């Protein structure tokens, strides 16, 4: 096991397994975004409640989830996008068909090698920070500024030109890298 | 690692990735990040997290 909390690593391995199944059937690999990606980039300095997934192949991904024993939660708030595994006690939610509305550079996606479980595709840290700044700029998520700043502190050698463009886009021009450095 | 992660040519072993982040944490002193308070969760997210919790999940 790695330095990540065991529950997180188990979910990451399952995600890699799902990704390999998708690729074996000729579909593109799903991508981990959101809090799960932040947890990966911070070594569990923050813990995520579940895994947010981007996939353009929702039906095929859900077929693989079913094969692995995932079920859809029932009751109030139920939508077809969330899946839980009752025995492994973890959840995946399909949040989008495109990576940050198609604005993220897919060539920057990070691949994590999980050995026999396969590879997991993760949104780039630059796009993750830009996403946080976009949420902050919306006014609804004030804590995201500090989350973005600490992620940037951890990854200060990220591609600054790309990140500047992405933060500007996600925040409608309001913020940039300078706002992470103050 | 971020420069590597920006132009991925091959997958990075998890242990190597974790060791790199650990080095960064030690160098910067960043050991925690502010959490989302959970007040903006969608009904779908609430239902999913409730299901995980009901199953005994420790997330």
Image: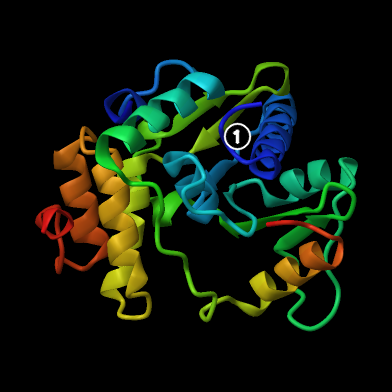
Q: Going 85% across and 68% down the picture, which residue do you hit?
A: B54
Q: Callout 1: few (<14), some (14-19), or many (20+) C-alpha neighbours within 10 Å?
A: many
Q: Position of residue A152 (x, y in %)?
A: 26, 46
**Image quadrant assignment for residue B5:** top left
Q: Position of residue A14 (x, y in %)?
A: 73, 36
**Image quadrant assignment for residue A126:** top left
Camera-nearest residue between A102 and A9: A9
Q: Going 49% across and 53% down the picture, which residue do you hit?
A: A46
**Image quadrant assignment for residue A172:** bottom left
The residue labelled by disc 1 is A29
Question: Which color scheme does this rendered protein use?
Answer: rainbow
Q: Going 35% across and 37% down the picture, which residue do you hit?
A: B25
Q: Classify the position of the N terminus of chain A by image quarter.
A: top right
| Side (left or right) of B5 relative to A45 | left
Q: Going 67% across and 22% down the picture, which residue do you hit?
A: A118
Callout 1: SS:
loop
- In the picture shown, does residue A102 fall above or below A118? below
Q: Position of residue B10 (x, y in %)?
A: 46, 16
Which chain is home to disc 1? A
Residue A103 visible in the displayed image: no
Residue B47 visible in the displayed image: yes
Q: Position of residue A29 (x, y in %)?
A: 60, 34
**Number of labelled discs?**
1
Q: Classify the position of the C terminus of chain A by image quarter.
A: bottom left
- In the picture shown, does residue B33 fall above or below A105? below
């Amino acid at each position: 096991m790695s330095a990540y909390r065991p529950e997180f690593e188990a979910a990451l391995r399952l995600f890699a397994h799902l990704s390999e199944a998708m690729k074996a059937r000729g579909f593109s690999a799903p991508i981990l975004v959101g809090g799960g990606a932040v947890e990966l980039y911070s070594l569990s300095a923050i813990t995520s409640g579940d895994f947010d997934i981007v996939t353009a192949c929702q039906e095929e991904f859900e077929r693989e989830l079913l094969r692995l024993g995932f079920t859809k939660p029932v009751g109030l708030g139920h939508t077809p996008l969330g899946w839980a595994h009752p025995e492994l006690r973890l959840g995946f939610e399909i949040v989008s068909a495109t990576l940050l509305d198609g604005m993220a550079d897919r060539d920057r996606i990070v691949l994590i090698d999980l050995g026999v479980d396969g590879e997991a595709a993760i949104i780039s840290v630059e796009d993750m920070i830009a996403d946080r700044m976009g949420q902050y700029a919306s006014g609804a998520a004030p804590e995201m500024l500090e989350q973005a700043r600490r992620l940037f502190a951890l990854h200060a050698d990220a591609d600054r030109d790309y990140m500047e463009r992405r933060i500007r886009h996600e925040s409608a021009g309001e913020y940039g890298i300078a706002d992470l450095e103050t | 690692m971020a420069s590597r992660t920006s132009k991925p040519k091959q997958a990075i072993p998890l242990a190597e990735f974790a060791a790199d982040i650990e080095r960064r944490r030690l160098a910067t002193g960043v050991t925690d990040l502010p959490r989302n308070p959970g007040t903006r969760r969608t009904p779908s997210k609430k239902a999913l997290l409730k299901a995980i919790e009901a199953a005994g999940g420790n997330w």
